[in-house]
Image (cartoon, helix red, strand yellow):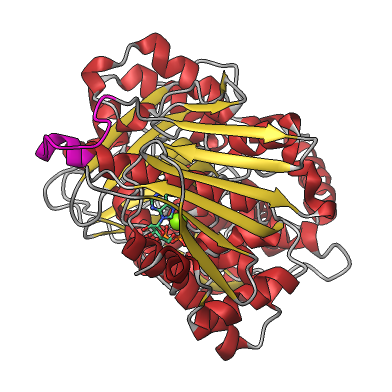
Amino acid sequence: MTKEAQSEKQTFQAEVQQLLDIVIHSLYTDKEIFIRELVSNAADALEKLHHLQLKKSDIFEADKELEIKISLDEETGTITIADTGLGMSREELIENLGTIAHSGSKKFLQSLSESGQKESNLIGQFGVGFYSSFMVSDDVEVFSRSWKNDGESLCWKSDGKTGYTIEQVEDQDRGTRIVIHLREDQKDFSKKATVQKVLETYSNFVPFPIQLDGERINKVEALWRKNKSEISDEEYKEFYHFTAGAFDEPRYRMHFSADAPIEINALLFTPSENQELWGMGQMEPGVSLYCKNVLIDDKPKGLLPDWLRFLKGVIDSSDLPLNISRESMQDSALIQKLNRVVTRRFLKFLGKEAKSSPDSYIEFYKKFNRFLKEGVASDPDHQEGLAELLRFQSSMTENGELTSFEQYLDRAKDDQKQIYYLIADDRKAIEAGPYLEAFKSRGIEVIYFLEPIDDYVVSRLAKYKDKDLISADRADIELDDSELEEKGERLGDEALESLCKFITEELGEQVEKVEASDRLIDSPAATFDPGDQMSAQMRRMMQALNPDEPAPPVKVNLQINPRHELIHQLSKAQESNPGLAKLVAAQVLDTSLLASGLLDDRTSLINRGFDLMKSALAEKK
Ligand code: ADP
Ligand code: MG
């Protein structure tokens, strides 16, 4: 081939031509991504050379430092990106820059023809690799000198329209130097401040030095790809502050790498403070996604479950394509895999921490339990793992002390088939109420759920391991009486039957059923949920949400304690003073409803209370 023939114009492959046509005419606004694409190509070329160095001894300019140099010239309006990587031979220039080489651009074209979307949206989603340089220029020169000792010094040149030329040029350094002559309206990219900002956003962790007009830009090391033993606590902390934009001490740090089922390097932190508790609104996802140290997305949706939005740090996977679309991220099988693997690892990690340093875990839990509970309620995939991490008070903990389902089951008798809980605003309300006594007297532990969201969370959880979670105010719970110490004489069956009938007739609508119960020990009576009622907390919430609607009707079982003095007296009064007995029956129900938080209107309770006092005093006269 003669020199002239070599510099003859070559035409682009049809697809490249189509792509370039779109790139040049697109109104895509984030044109700055061309810098990310070219720097990432340079980093790839350096990494490939680094691998060659390990295998081969005959590399051209073998001692040259591996680095990326970017230089700007405002006067001529150029930006030059040079690397000392493996360079390209003539064939490689033709193959790599003249045909659709990389899968991102292929997908771009495909989805363009399929979706009918505006191309400007799609460019951002896929990135268009090297060709993105034509978004800002219609005159790009690629000088390249291959690593092979007998390589040529070449210049590939194109206006990005019809084709390109390749010429032999005077001796070049090893690697590739791309000179972009910026279009008039894109001259901003020859300004240092502009370019520096773009580099700091996308390329801070590129593992080779990047110099911008002689100044080193990427100073922060990609700690996540380093060996744990080579990193000090101080470095970790500094990195956390840098990536999370935070100032506090991280409470937990999880640094791991894996090769299967997907290549992952992750470095994750939990903060010590929960900003959502300060009323600052919902946090954005705080874990950035990288591919080989190059940023893909700093707030990726779908990379981790929503409830993990308090995590900070970096996940890096070289299995990801650099140009993965933000929009299709959640659908990507790779992202879903990353999501699953990292979430599981993190839950396991927390479980270990909770065991080895329980005090520290409780401190964490007190600030971050909302997120875990949100996960229990919204994420069936990780519900079981999350449930193990829940902590709560119970009838067997000291005031304020927290326990777990695991510990509950350790304490429970082997034949206990269910896990019991009560929901209320505070511990006192539960312990003063009528439901606990049946369980306490039988030595059965009852969990106390004391937060507004707990109601929703337990109802979504429904089970722990193979045991159903049952509210201790359910009417249909059967408890073993064999070891129970009985208090007081039991009212006869006949008298009980007649009393229940009397009360049922008197109270009509409000009760589904009146029955004698051995679940009550110290209380004379209590209302129980026949099994289909919403909890008092839920009712209150509904009422708060719809203040104009009538309160949902209440239908309860009223259980009476056949050993209680009041019930004995009521049974007698049924014959001797039916008027008073009716008053008392109504008052027993209203008081029981009040105790369980189900009484909507207190007026009759109060008035009847005064009437009863009046009759009590009249009697004594
Ligand atoms: P991708 O990087 O996804 O492969 P690009 O369009 O960014 O797609 O680049 C196309 C190809 O051109 C690369 O795969 C690589 O082989 C080659 N290339 C681009 N830039 C360089 C460079 N600086 N040094 C060596 N080869 C390069
Ligand atoms: Mg590329």
Q: Nearer the viewer, residue 43 or 493?
A: 43
Question: Could you tell whether 613 is left or right of 110 in the image?
Answer: right
Coordinates of residue 493 in the picture (x, y in percent): 35, 66
Most distant residue in the right direction: 548
Coordinates of residue 109 in the picture (x, y in percent): 53, 81
Specify whether residue 61 is painted magenta.
yes
Q: Nearer the viewer, residue 254 or 361?
A: 254
Name the residue: 66% across, 77% down. Answer: 21
- Count of marks placed on residues: 0
Coordinates of residue 238 in the picture (x, y in percent): 48, 16
- Vertical arrangement, residue 297 with respect to residue 174, above or below: below
Specify whether residue 437 is painted magenta.
no
Q: Nearer the viewer, residue 301 or 479?
A: 301
* Ligand 2 placement by image quarter: bottom left
Question: Could you tell whether 340 is left or right of 50 in the image?
Answer: right
In the image, which residues are magenta? 51-63
Inspect this view and state whether residue 475 appears: no
Q: Nearer the viewer, residue 153 or 589?
A: 153
Inspect this view and state whether residue 185 appears: yes
